[in-house]
Image: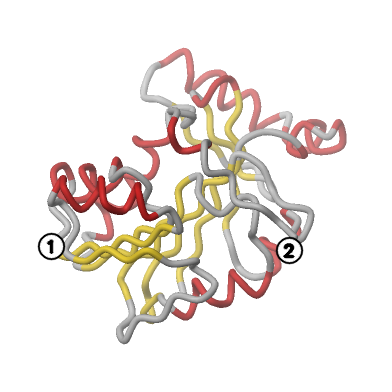
Amino acid sequence: MIKYDFKYTLTFHSPGLEPWVCGLLRRLKPVSVLDVGCGLGYWGFILKGYLGVPYIVGVDIDSSKVEFARRLGVYDELYTSDIREFNYPRAFDVVLAIESIHGILDIRLLERLEGFTRKGGLIVLALPILSKSITISDLIKRGYITYRYLLRGFLLVRVDKAEYATTPTRLWRIVGFLIMFLHPVLRVMGVFRRGYILAVKVV
């Protein structure tokens, strides 16, 4: 049986994750977001305070974290539940799972998350690791655009194509261009088999 990592979200792990995710969401301008594994409410603050999302629902398996997030008052609704058993009557513009489902992710859970997403909506998965139940190839086959973080998060490189995003400085753009040029060689060397994953899908 796969166990949840309850201590994981007590520390900050994201390698420069927020700018990339916020950039995606700012362009979409979502009205509703489901925050899967909302934890202590960190992303609730970003969604409500920075991006101005009108309606946010949070769900987490840890009741103490849900109660803490409830006291912050940024979520419109909060639930203590395993996402694999969670039910909700409406679909969301965005389903966000940031560093919360890496230990339990499989095809069935992906299908469930996609079911929570309205047509034309977005799923964003940030995964420090992948469980043994799923591979990057599985994500790509299901239509997820999958990126790896390289160089401590300053560079985001798509796994299956020569495409990159960097922080907006000349040096990192040059580095990004070089890595894009070397993409086929890096794939053969296995560079994209390890590291932090960001997977995005329009449903």
The residue that label 2 is drawn on is 138
Counting from the top left corner in percent of width and height, residue 110 is at: 59, 69
Mark 2 vs 1, N-terminal side: 1
The answer to whether 171 is drawn above or below residue 79 in the figure is above
Mark 1 nearby-residue class (10 Å; few <14, some 14–19, many ≥20): some
Element at label 1 = loop
Residue visible at 34% across and 35% down in the picture: 19
The residue that label 1 is drawn on is 54
Q: In the picture provided, is 132 more to the left or to the right than 71?
A: right
Residues marked 2 and 1 touching at CB (< 8 Å): no
Q: In the picture provided, is 109 more to the left or to the right than 13?
A: right
Q: Amino acid at mark 2?
A: Asp
Residue visible at 48% across and 35% down in the picture: 165
Counting from the top left corner in percent of width and height, residue 139 is at: 66, 61
Q: Residue furthest top?
A: 171
Q: Amino acid at mark 1?
A: Pro
